[in-house]
Amino acid sequence: MQELDDLVSSLREDGFRITPQRVAILDYLLRTDDHPSAEYIHQVVKKQYPMVSLSTVYKTLDLLKEKKLVGEIEVGGQTRFDAHTDAHINLVCMKCGKIDDLDENSLNEIQNRAAKKSKYLILKGNFELFGYCNECKSALS
Amino acid sequence: MQELDDLVSSLREDGFRITPQRVAILDYLLRTDDHPSAEYIHQVVKKQYPMVSLSTVYKTLDLLKEKKLVGEIEVGGQTRFDAHTDAHINLVCMKCGKIDDLDENSLNEIQNRAAKKSKYLILKGNFELFGYCNECKSALS
DNA sequence: TATTAGTTGATAATGATTCCTAATTAATAA
DNA sequence: TTATTAATTAGGAATCATTATCAACTAATA
Ligand SMILES: [Mn+2]
Ligand SMILES: [Mn+2]
Ligand SMILES: [Zn+2]
Ligand SMILES: [Zn+2]
């Protein structure tokens, strides 16, 4: 994938070492829209690279967050990660735990207006809607 | 305060027991706009009611969440609470940890539009902007 | 005032995340 | 290609916010 190669090159240019662990984690994050937890990323990546440790997953995620290649949202006491870095809505199903993305044009404008009104220097925004997904709401007790 | 009395009455009508601990915790949440953590609520309430335990703070917060009298946002690995239950933006300072409220009319409309587009049954929304508050951005290294 | 089911306080358990460090290895140049 | 070395990793221990447990207490009711 072109995007993966570009990002890997840019990490190397920034002086970071390119390890198979880092590439595998970034590759998975770029391919999925699952909003996986660190634990889940570990399970997935281990299938292809059984040597990857959970510690390395956490450290790689820290690196990718710092480089703004992934975002994070905290849900139910754990952090879920997302390589979809434009401002968007995350729909969180409170029953099955699924998280879906939803584009919403007005978010950037809201963010700019908020920066002006509040005098905060805004670095990122998280927009979360909690409820039941289409499947889970049908199966409500 | 009238609002406190009304809410206490409504809790009693729902069959919950009215204890001094519960009243003190709800009273503090209604008076502050601090977005306190459970630990912080415990510190504050203990000054007036030294017998309140942290366990009780957590259990009371569960009750108030269930009754939708308080909302919660997860920030930096801990939960912060808010009796301001209308849809609004929470501005989170990543340096000093302060959280400010900011009203934004379009949020309810966004939420309705998202419910239609996604087919989710939406139960609540959290809108968080992260950055540096006016004081902290001036003091940036 | 007695009854009793709901509530509390103290403490243990849990679990996601962070910390620590010896062993490994990606990157560079001889 | 091989040697050098500082960055990175793996694995386990530590942390800490939250949840679970349960005997003692008490708000509500009659
Ligand atoms: Mn997303
Ligand atoms: Mn708020
Ligand atoms: Zn669902
Ligand atoms: Zn600040």
Image (cartoon, coloured by chain):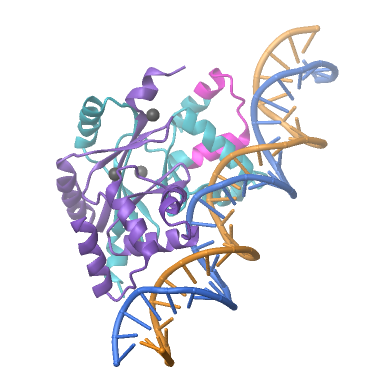
Chain colours: A cyan, B purple, C orange, D blue
Q: Is residue B45 visible?
A: yes
Q: Quadrant of the C terminus of chain A?
A: bottom left
- Residue B58 image offset from top left, x and y in percent: 44, 59
Q: Quadrant of ligand 1?
A: top left
**Nearer to us in this view, A61 or D20:** D20
Task: Write the residue at 38% across / 56% down.
Answer: A98
- Residue B136 image offset from top left, x and y in percent: 39, 24
Q: Main secondary structure of the magenta part?
A: helix
Q: Is residue A17 magenta?
A: yes
**Nearer to us in this view, B105 or A8:** B105
**Nearer to us in this view, A118 or B5:** B5
User: Looking at the picture, does residue B45 appear above or below residue B94?
Assistant: below
- Residue D17 image offset from top left, x and y in percent: 50, 50
Task: Write the residue at 56% across / 22% down.
Answer: A12
Q: Is residue C27 left or right of residue A84?
A: right
Task: Write the residue at 41% across / 53% down.
Answer: B48
Count the marks.
0
Q: Quadrant of residue B16?
A: bottom left
Q: Is residue A58 left or right of residue B44?
A: right
Task: Write the residue at 54% across / 19% down.
Answer: A14
User: Looking at the picture, does residue B31 appear above or below residue A22?
Assistant: below
Q: Is residue A139 left or right of residue A66?
A: left
Q: Is residue B120 visible?
A: no
- Residue A2 image offset from top left, x and y in percent: 44, 29
Q: What's drawn in magenta, residue-wise?
A: A9-28
